[in-house]
Each structure stands twice: as C-alpha cells, then as structure tokens.
Image: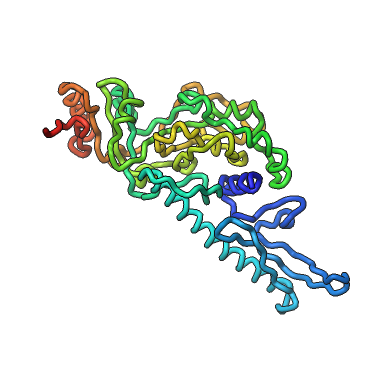
C-alpha cells in the first residue's frame, strides 16, 4: 500500500494520468502513455490463444482493474486498441474528478474543524486550489515589507532557504526506504533526490506564503506581524492566481506525517508543497517560482546564483488587493500613516481598515 501511494503521489506531481506508466513486472509496455497494453491470453492447455488489448481503470477505493478488448471482436487490431484507449480515457477522467472532489471536501472539512475519514490516496494534482475558488487569502507583514511591496509594485517571493522551517524541501524516511523500488518501476530519470541537489534547490526556488480563511486570524497576527506596526493585505485565490506568470505555480500546502508520507521526487517543486502536521494551523496557500534554471541545476551544470534571496512578481496591486487591514493593537497615528501610503499610490481604490479584532466588547 505504501508503494502504491508513492506511485500515485508521483503521478499527481508530474500531472500524468493515473495508470499511464509502469515498469518491469508489469502492467504496461514501456513508452505506452495511454494506459493500455497488448496482451495474449492462452487457455489451460496452452493451445488456444486470445490476443487482446487490455485497458486499466481504478475503482472508487483505489484498486486498479483491467478490461479486455478481444481483437477478434473488432475488424482490425487498431480498432480494438482505439476502443481500449477510449475506455481508459473516460474512466480516468471520471476517477480524476472524483479524486478532486474528495480532496476539495477534505480541505473544506479541515477548515471547518471536521475530522474527515482518513484517505491515503493521493490527490489528483500537486497544486490544489482551496475548496472554494473565491476563498479569501491573507498576507500578514510588517510595515517595511508593506511599503516595499507598494514601491516595487509586485508580490515578493522569498528563497526557500530563507524561511523558518528547516524541513522545507526535505524528503521523508519513506522516500529513503522506497526510493529504489519507485525508481525501478517508474523509471525516474534526472530525479532531484540526490542529497546535494535537494539541498541546493532550497536556494533556487522562491515562495510567497498566504493564509486561507474567511476571517482574520488572531494567531496569524501574532505569528507573522509581531509588532504593533503591522498590516495584512486581503485578496482572493482567483485574483492571486490571475497575476502569476507561466513559470509560477500556486496551490494549498499539504500537511503530512513525514514518518508515513512519500514526498514526490519527479517534480522539483513537489517537496516544497508539503509541511509537517505541526504547521497545519497555517492553512497555507503557496506560490512557487523557480529562481533559476532548475534543469541545469539538476544536471549539475554551472548556473548563475541568485544572491538577492528574493524575487518579484510584478502586478497591478489595485487589481490584486481587496483591502488593507491594520494590526488590532496599532496606534491611531500608524493607521493614518498606512492610509497616506495607500492614498499616495492608489488613492481610494484600495480601502484601509482597522482589524475587527480591535472592536470593543459589549457587556
């Protein structure tokens, strides 16, 4: 089961159709990417032979099954193959949709504090959207970063190795144990699992971290805006994803038990979409963007180094930001200063609000 889960994680990370690859022992011809194989069945006496095309599909509980298409029932071999491929494609589309709905439901239940039934199967994609595309997302920051964001007119990405969590981009003991089998059967070439490359990748991937919630978070104010002079910008997933360049990806971080979880190795960005369960309270939506030529780094060729430690995604902040919230314990003069800064750049296009956490209680 652990090996099967590792295969599915790799398929999800590489955006391939489930069941489209397999190796020795196995199930599909090398190079066949349509989930079908040519198969020759024989009777018990090894006399009568039944040439056929065999198509794979998955049941709702993740078991892989096969359907046979006897060539004798079709006019040509190609017709039988095409029928098998059509069946496989239809079944895989249906399976992928079910997987996406399952993962969306899991995220929604998690946000509501409901413990879902444990499901070990991989999600359909490495980069999952929030359960609701119009979900609010928040970025808590100190005032200097806020002013710099307005001055530079864009969203900053910090190098992964500059983030606080030392586990960022790391693999798990499951990878160490199953790596030989996964590589053998999936024929992973150019994998990023070589230790020195994995560690180097932390310097070559930029991240922008956002909190997904329909409401402000007192915990996020304390964690990521540790002074009174702090602000939070609020937008939506749809607006944030709309500003991204073609080489950037966005998705919900997955919080996993590193003692049990396979971390995909075929996609160089995959290790940065997983975090330990201890960080689950963050409900993080993460933007990832390469800061250099990852293919050259993978092949250990010499590539220019990103010395700055950050990168910028230029964008129209007026289209991105729905509101700017001032820290609940900020003094009045600071709120006025934030308002002047916003007015200087965008006038009244972006509203400035004091955090609702500053509201007075009723007795």
Q: Quadrant of residue 115?
A: top left
In the image, farthest residue toward the left:
363
Q: Is residue 256 above or below residue 227?
A: below
Taking the spot 64% from the left edge, 33% from the top edge, the residue there is: 193
Residue 253, visible in the rendered structure: yes
Taking the spot 21% from the left edge, 39% from the top edge, the residue there is: 349
Left or right: 67 in relation to 359 = right
Taking the spot 19% from the left edge, 30% from the top edge, the residue there is: 358
Q: Quadrant of residue 113?
A: top left
Q: Quadrant of the C terminus?
A: top left
Q: Residue 19, how many percent across, how many down?
A: 64, 55
Q: Quadrant of residue 43?
A: bottom right
How many numbered marks, from 0 up?
Answer: 0
Q: Residue 276, how many percent across, how many down?
A: 50, 33
Q: How is the image coloured?
A: rainbow
Left or right: 75 in relation to 199 = right
Q: Residue 24, how many percent across, how many down?
A: 76, 50
The residue closer to the viewer here, 15 or 293, is 15
The residue closer to the viewer here, 52 or 174, is 174
The residue closer to the viewer here, 319 or 19, is 19
Residue 263, visible in the rendered structure: no
Taking the spot 28% from the left edge, 40% from the top edge, the residue there is: 215
Q: Residue 175, how many percent across, how many down?
A: 64, 36
Q: Is residue 247 above or below residue 146?
A: below
Q: Is residue 247 above or below residue 169?
A: below
């Amino acid at each position: 089961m652990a090996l099967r889960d590792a295969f599915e994680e790799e398929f999800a990370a590489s955006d391939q159709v489930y069941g489209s690859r397999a190796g020795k022992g196995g199930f599909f011809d090398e190079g066949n990417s349509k989930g079908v194989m040519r198969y020759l069945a024989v009777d018990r006496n090894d006399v009568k032979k039944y040439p056929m095309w065999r198509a794979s599909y998955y049941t709702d509980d993740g078991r892989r099954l096969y359907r046979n298409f006897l060539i004798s029932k079709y006019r040509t071999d190609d017709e039988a193959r095409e029928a098998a491929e059509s069946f496989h494609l239809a079944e895989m589309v249906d399976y992928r949709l079910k997987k996406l709905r399952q993962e969306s439901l899991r995220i929604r239940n998690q946000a509501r504090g409901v413990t879902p039934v444990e499901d070990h199967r991989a999600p359909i994609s490495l980069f999952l959207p929030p359960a609701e595309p119009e979900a609010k997302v928040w970025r808590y920051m100190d005032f200097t970063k806020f002013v710099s964001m307005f001055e530079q007119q864009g969203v900053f990405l910090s190098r992964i190795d500059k983030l606080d969590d030392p586990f960022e981009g790391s693999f798990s003991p499951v990878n160490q144990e199953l790596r030989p089998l996964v590589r053998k059967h999936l024929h992973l070439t150019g994998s990023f699992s070589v230790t020195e490359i994995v560690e180097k990748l932390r310097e070559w991937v930029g991240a922008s971290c956002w909190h997904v919630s329909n409401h402000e978070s007192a915990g996020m104010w304390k964690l990521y805006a540790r002074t009174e002079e702090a602000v939070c910008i609020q937008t939506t997933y749809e607006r944030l994803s709309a500003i991204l360049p073609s080489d950037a990806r966005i998705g919900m971080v997955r919080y996993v038990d590193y003692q049990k979880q396979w971390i995909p190795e075929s996609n160089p960005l995959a290790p940065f979409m997983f975090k330990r369960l201890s960080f689950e309270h963050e409900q993080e939506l993460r933007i990832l963007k390469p800061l250099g030529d990852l293919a050259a780094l993978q092949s250990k060729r010499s590539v220019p180094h990103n010395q700055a430690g950050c990168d910028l995604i230029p964008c129209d902040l007026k289209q991105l930001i729905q509101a700017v919230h001032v820290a609940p314990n900020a003094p009045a003069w600071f709120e006025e200063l934030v308002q002047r800064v916003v007015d200087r750049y965008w006038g009244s296009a972006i509203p400035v609000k004091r955090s609702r956490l500053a509201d007075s209680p009723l007795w």
